[in-house]
Amino acid sequence: MLRFESKPIAETPASDGRKHDNEVPLADDGRWERLIAEWNEKREQPRVREGGNADYVVSVGDDKDPRVRQAQLEEILALTRSSGDRVVGEELRHVAYPNPRTLLGRGVAEEVAAKARACGANMLVLDAELSPSQTRNLEDVTKLPVCDREGIILNVFLRHARTRRARICVEIAQLAWLSPRIRGVGINMDQQAAGMGAARGPGETASELLARKLDARTLQLEKALEKLSTSDDTRRAQRADAKRLVLVGYTNAGKTSLMNALAKEQLSARDAPFETLDTTSRCLTRHGGDVILSDTVGFIRRLPERLLASFESTLSEVAEATLLVIVLDASDHERELHLSTTHDVLERLGAEHIPRFYVWNKLDRATDVDLRELAALSDGHPFRAISTRDEAAVSELLHTLVSAARAGEEPVTMLVPYDASEILSLVYARCRVTETEALPEGLRLTFQGPAQATARIRARLERRSQ
């Protein structure tokens, strides 16, 4: 089961030994964290300490297509394993009419619980979004802790969050998930009297106190995230002239592997959902860094709204991209669904108007792929079908993407005086010089670059001549 953790974010101490201003401190010196621990301890049955929980996974859906249902089961199994738990049993359940109290219905829930115990499971995982009351009702019926789809995805995010920004985003989403689940569960909920003597009135219950603490912690984290966003805005402003290629797509489609191949990097690209949570950017060109490639967190079907909201600042670069490079797994028979999910998320991010380039990845694994089908799915946008193991194909793709990013740049010719060193530096730093001619009055340069950079160079040259 998802367990709440609130820990100080590790930071390198300042040279004078003081904490950084942007450090998120441990709330209340750990006092209310002990309430969380007591809540978890009384709510859950004994957990498997080595290798995570032993989970019995149930894929719940109403789709009649067996291939779709099997794909959904494989996805929740991959998420469960990526969260660090062990899968000891699994099954598909067709639920055409969800029970409002327990989703499955009491009889089905008891049957599932019996199978889970026979497999040695100590946790029931349902591939569905459960309300807090449905979770409690299911736990009452099955006598097993229950985790829903959102809880599993949060566990995966918790496991893979490495940077300060990712850990803050995950904890904000975690608090939002936890808040409605604390009332009336486990710990002593007696209401404490307030005031003095006869004037004593109703005070706070333990759950109300804990809810207030959770709200305070959320506000604290949101302020810390706002500071990080401000610094990120500054960094983005510094590279405002650059063309931005942003890798987006379904989780585990191979975005980071493609990033490594294009940028000659060695970022972690394990075959696991949500291995990448932070946006990572690398320069693709040597000419002033005019083309930057960014890798982003992957998408998934039924992505919980609170997770998308928490990672909104991380995904902000998607809406600012010059070109969206949509990466899809060509070998996956659910590629159409993955493409539809990607389009839906891009629309929610307000990025549906940005030019697109489709990369159908893992071609070496595809046995029944038809390029005409991929062309149709790309909907008239340019596309390539490649394997990141094919160096020649990756090199060709790199050239194609850089050319696409630079499309529309017009050559500019200027006469720059020899003593205008700052203008010459700007030209060579931000643009690509294609022709140089030495004249008595200065250098005649022909170059290409981003419109903002060429406009800035022209303005400086005009001010100098006045």
Image (cartoon, rainbow, N blue to C red):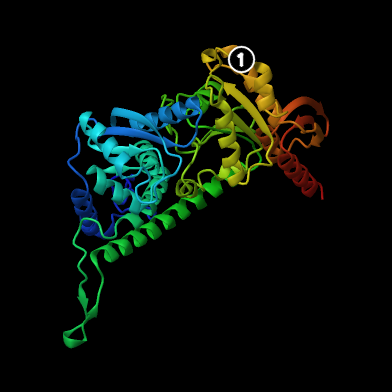
Vertical placement of residue 439 versus 229, above or below:
above
**Which residue position is annotated with label 1?**
393
Q: Residue furthest front?
A: 107
The foreground one among 218 and 232 is 218
Is 180 in front, or is 359? 180
- Identify the secondary structure beneath mark 1: helix
In the rendered view, does 394 fall on the left or right side of 67?
right
* Residue located 21% across and 30% down the image: 118
Q: Quadrant of the N terminus?
A: top left
- Whether residue 431 is visible: yes
Q: Does any portion of residue 399 appear in the rendered image?
A: no
Q: Count the marks: how many? A: 1
Task: Provide residue 104's location: percent of width, then percent of height.
Answer: 36, 42
Can you give x and y, in whole percent of width and height, for residue 59 in the image?
Answer: 39, 34
Indicate the quadrant where residue 182 lies: bottom left
348 to 21, vertically: above or below: above
57 up-or-down from 182: above or below: above
Q: Position of residue 435 (x, y in %)?
A: 78, 25
In this rendering, would 253 be left or right of 81? right
User: Which sits in the foreground, 247 or 192?
Assistant: 192
* Picture quadrant where residue 325 is located: top right
Q: Residue at x 69, y 36 (%)?
A: 355
Amino acid type for the residue under numbered disc 1 = Ala
| Label 1 Cα crowd, 10 Å radius (few <14 / some 14-19 / many 20+) | some
Q: Position of residue 49 (x, y in %)?
A: 19, 35
Instruction: Give the left or right position of residue 384, taking residue 417 as reference.
Output: left
Residue drawn 54% across the image and 15% down it = 366
